[in-house]
């Protein structure tokens, strides 16, 4: 069953549709066809790069998973304000499996608090297989909530102690649905297939009951836990669930607070050290962000304050992690600098200024009721540009270029205050320039340090990224008039669907500011 479209922000993996924009000059920036951001194209290139072969095996101990299409593959990214970019089989449903452990752990922490939960399940990496029959020798606690012994216990901690197993399962289903932002359902075929072969989990549950770690009937607990793992999700769902964690527990699209920030910190900490089973050490050293995998082929990762990441590919390595999923996560981490130990430069708002330049003839034309001529939209950037900040820049360009009632025919991207650009951010901005040029805009780039590599050593333009000119300053616009656009923070609020004073509400008016030197 295909999931419903949750938000127009996910249409075509591009961004939010903008409608109802009025003709106010503050609302006027770029004309012509909308520039589609290259983020999804980048994700496609990541997917293709990691698909030169398809090693590993489907999970063989669950018949339904063993028969899954091994060639399925997808990658999704969700920003913390709910924009989802994807490539591949992003809307194909599969069972969440062990990825559910992280979110059920969050629900247990939300219900009972950290002290209560950690008295019953530890946080130490086990160094053993995920389905090992093992407990701490002194406390009889499971070592962590990401292995099966800990996850089965954590399952029993959701809700009041005297709740029935069906009631607990419904709380879990609703809780995971809140993280995803849509109603999730249990795949009964997966459940039946997995339950039939659940001898190992039954042994674990009996061990837990023997040591009085759980109080419920072991078979009933395993039944509920197996249904929990059989909840159907898509790669897009997982990206949004990860983005909810990255957003401090607030679901990016619904705006619902699903869990407290202290719960998120605890969950991400345990995911970081234990989420990838006995492959966690390699994961932390090579990829370096909190993640959780499932034997259906899903992997989910969260970058606090930035992104939710999800991949899907059914074939697994010897640790039970998706082979191509791990590859894609490593490629994303390497390209975007996502490793937790990567030390970025001190961050500032990447958008320094955002305004319109009007030629001297333009004011005369407007005064006489004619059409404005010779105007340019300027986007001045600053600081270090990473994937996250570049995505917002592309969103502003895409938003502005969607407005077709404008006389603006040129775009100026000013990089004089930028001191570094990450590799993937450079590719994205170069691609945006190419698409703006293809859409009919004149594109000028102020790039005296050649950060975008638009010219060669002899100052000749790069044919692969056609712009009309690469210039060192704005001296050619010295006698042009500057008209302010709405504050960039309002621009971001407006395009994410939150209430703000951005252009699309039709209320913002142009604000003339004193003429300044265009060299600034």
Image (cartoon, rainbow, N blue to C red):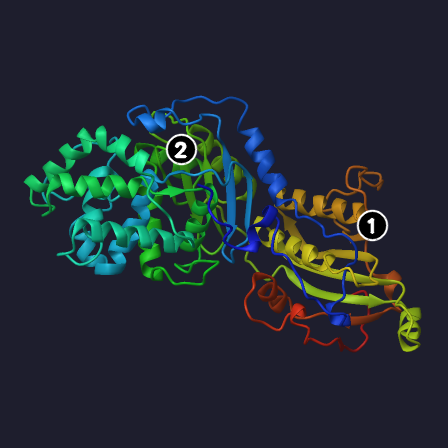
Indicate left or right for 491 with 31 as reference.
left
Location of the C terminus by quadrant is bottom right
Q: Quadrant of residue 406?
A: bottom right
Seen in the picture, residue 24 relative to 191 is either above or below; the reply is below
Residue 481 percent coordinates (x, y): 84, 71
Q: Find disc 1 in the rendering and name its residue.
A: 440
Is tag 1's residue or tag 2's residue first in the polypeptide sequence? 2
Indicate left or right for 144 with 350 as reference.
left
Residue occupying the point 82% across, 57% down = 410
Residue 269 percent coordinates (x, y): 33, 49
Residue 474 percent coordinates (x, y): 83, 61
- Front residue of this view, candidates 440 and 343: 440
**Circle 2 SS class:** loop
Seen in the picture, residue 43 relative to 493 is either above or below; the reply is above
- Front residue of this view, candidates 445 and 217: 217
Instruction: Point out which mark residue 127 bears.
Output: none
Indicate left or right for 41 with 71 as reference.
right
Instruction: Point out which mark residue 297 bears.
Output: 2
**Circle 1 SS class:** loop
Seen in the picture, residue 86 relative to 479 is either above or below; the reply is above
Look at the numbered discs 1 and 2 and tell me whether their residues touch, using CB distance below 8 Å. no
Residue occupying the point 32% across, 34% down = 189
Report the Cα–Cα distance between label 1 and label 2: 43 Å
Crowding near the residue tagged with mark 1, few <14, some 14–19, many ≥20 C-alpha atoms within 10 Å: few
Crowding near the residue tagged with mark 2, few <14, some 14–19, many ≥20 C-alpha atoms within 10 Å: many
- Front residue of this view, candidates 148 and 18: 18
Indicate left or right for 231 with 423 as reference.
left
Residue 12 percent coordinates (x, y): 61, 46
- Front residue of this view, candidates 91 and 492: 91
Residue occupying the point 25% across, 56% down = 109
């Amino acid at each position: 069953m295909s999931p419903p479209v949750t938000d127009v922000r996910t249409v075509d993996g591009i961004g939010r549709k903008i409608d109802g924009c009025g003709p106010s000059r503050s609302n006027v920036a770029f004309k012509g066809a909308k520039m589609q951001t290259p983020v999804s194209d980048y994700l496609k290139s990541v997917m293709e790069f990691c698909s030169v072969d398809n090693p590993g095996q489907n999970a063989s101990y669950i018949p339904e998973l063993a028969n899954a299409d091994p060639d399925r593959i997808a990658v999704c990214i969700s920003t913390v304000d709910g924009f989802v970019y994807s490539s591949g089989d992003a809307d194909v449903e599969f069972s969440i499996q062990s990825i559910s452990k992280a979110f059920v752990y969050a629900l247990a922490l939300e219900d009972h608090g950290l002290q209560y939960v950690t008295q019953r399940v530890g946080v130490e990496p086990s160094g053993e297989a995920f389905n090992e029959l093992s407990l701490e020798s002194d406390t009889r606690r499971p070592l962590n909530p990401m292995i099966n012994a800990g996850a089965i216990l954590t399952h029993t901690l959701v809700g009041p102690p005297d709740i029935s197993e069906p009631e607990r399962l419904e709380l879990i289903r609703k809780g995971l649905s809140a993280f995803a932002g849509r109603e999730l359902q249990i795949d009964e075929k997966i459940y039946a297939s997995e339950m039939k072969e659940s001898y190992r989990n039954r042994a674990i549950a009996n061990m837990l009951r023997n040591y009085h770690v759980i109080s419920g009937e072991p078979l009933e607990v395993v039944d509920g836990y197996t249904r929990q793992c059989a909840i159907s999700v898509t790669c897009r769902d997982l990206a949004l669930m990860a983005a909810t964690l990255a957003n401090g527990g607030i679901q990016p699209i619904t705006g619902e607070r699903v869990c407290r920030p202290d719960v998120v910190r605890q969950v991400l900490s345990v995911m970081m050290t234990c989420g990838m089973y006995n492959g966690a050490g390699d994961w932390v050293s090579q990829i370096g962000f909190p993640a959780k995998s499932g034997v259906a082929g899903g992997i989910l990762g969260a970058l606090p304050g930035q992104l939710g990441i999800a991949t899907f590919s059914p074939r697994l390595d010897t640790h039970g992690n998706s082979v191509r999923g791990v590859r894609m996560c490593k490629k994303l981490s390497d390209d975007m600098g996502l490793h937790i130990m990567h030390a970025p430069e001190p961050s500032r708002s990447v958008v320094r200024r955002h305004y319109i330049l009007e030629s001297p003839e333009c004011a005369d034309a407007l005064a006489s009721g004619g059409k404005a001529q010779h105007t340019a939209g300027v986007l001045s950037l600053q600081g270090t540009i990473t994937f996250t900040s570049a995505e917002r820049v592309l969103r502003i360009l895409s938003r502005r270029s969607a407005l077709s009632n404008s006389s603006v025919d040129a775009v100026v991207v000013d990089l004089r205050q930028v001191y570094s650009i990450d590799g993937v951010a450079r590719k994205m901005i170069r691609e945006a320039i190419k698409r703006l040029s293809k859409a009919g805009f004149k594109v000028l780039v102020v790039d005296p340090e050649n950060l975008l590599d638009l010219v060669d050593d002899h100052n000749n333009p790069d044919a692969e990224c056609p712009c009309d000119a690469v210039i060192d300053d704005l001296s050619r616009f010295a006698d042009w008039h500057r008209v302010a656009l709405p504050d960039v923070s309002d621009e971001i609020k407006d395009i994410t669907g939150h209430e703000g004073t951005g252009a699309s509400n039709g209320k913002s008016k142009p604000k003339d500011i004193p003429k300044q030197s265009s060299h600034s």
